[in-house]
Image: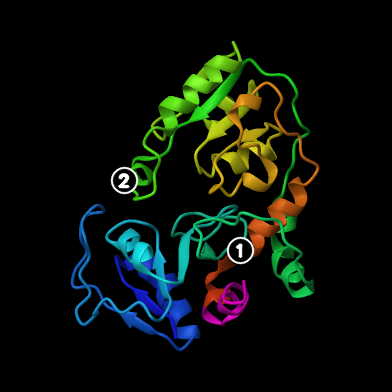
Amino acid sequence: MVQGFETRDSTDIPVRALVESANGHMWKKEKVVDQYEQTKWPGFDNNFDKPICVFGMLRGTSQLIQQSKDYYYFDHAYLFGNKHDKSKEIGEKIYRLTKNFFHVREIKRLNKPDYERIEKYRPFIKLKPWQYEGDYILFIPPSEHVKKYYWFDKDWEEQTLKTIKRHTRKEIKIRTKDSKESLDKDLEKAFCTVSYQSTVCIKSIMSGVPSFCIDESMGVPVSLTDISQIKDPLYTPEREKWIENLLANQFTMTEIQNGTAWKYVSNT
C-alpha cells in the first residue's frame, strides 16, 4: 500500500488521485507552510516500510524521499503541460510521475498500450534538425530549489565553468530562471547547452542543440556527461525514442484517477 503526503492544495490533487487508485493511505497536512519549511502530518510516525508518494521536493518532501525505501515522485509534465492548469494541447492537466528517481533516465522498450496512450501527443512533437554551429555555450545553473537538496554537488557550477573554459574558447552565456530573453531566442545561436538536471535540456535537444548534463538528468540518454568533450557534443539519432519515453512517464488526471498511471509506474 502506498502512502501519500499532502503539502498544498494544487499539488495534493494528483498525489491523492494516485493513492486512491492504488487503495493507499493519504496523510493530511496540518497546514500549508512556506516552501522551505517542514510540513507536519499528524499521526504519521515516520514508518517508511510502505512506499511513499509526493509532489516535488519542497515543504518537507525531500526529507521524506531521503528516508524512504521506495518513492513515487510527481512533478510538472515534461512536455505539453501547463503547471496546474489544463494543457493547451491536450485539454487536461498533465503531470510526470517516476519511481525512485526524479527523472526518466533511460530509453526502454514501450509496449502497444504505451504507444496508444502517448499517441495523443504526437501531432505536437516538433524536432528541428541538429545545428552543428553556434556562437556560444548556453549554461543553465541549477535552481535554488535544487541547490537546497541534500545530494546537490555544491562545487558543480564552479567546476563545470572552469572545465568549459579549459576546453573551449567559445563564449559562455548563462541563463537563469530570471532571464528575460526567451529560451527559443537563447537557443538560436547556441552551440550546445550545459545543465544540471534542468528540463531546459528537453527544449534544447528538440531544437537541435546538443546537450551536456549530469547522470541524474532526464537528458542523460541523449546527452554527454563529460564536460571535457565540450567541443565534440553528441548528435544522437535516438531523440524520438527518448521523447516517447518521457511522454510515457507523464499522465493526464484521467489516467491518474483510473489507475493507468499506477499500473505503469509501479511496474517500473
Label 1, on which residue? Answer: 249
Q: Nearer the viewer, residue 245 or 257?
A: 245
The N terminus appears in which quarter of the rendering?
bottom left
Q: Position of residue 40 (x, y in %)?
A: 20, 70
Label 2, on which residue? Answer: 148
Q: Which residues, given as a range, are shown in magenta?
A: 257-268
- Residue 180 seen anywhere in this rendered image of the structure: no
The residue at the point 38 percent across, 70 percent down is 68
Q: Which mark is residue 123?
A: none
Amino acid of disc 2: Lys
**Other residues around mark 2 within 10 Å, as few (<14) / some (14–19) / many (≥20):** some
Dot 2: what SS? Answer: loop
Amino acid of disc 1: Asn
The residue at the point 56 percent across, 31 percent down is 194
Dot 1: what SS? Answer: loop
In this rendering, the answer to whether 147 lies above or below 43 is above
Q: Position of residue 90 (x, y in %)?
A: 62, 61
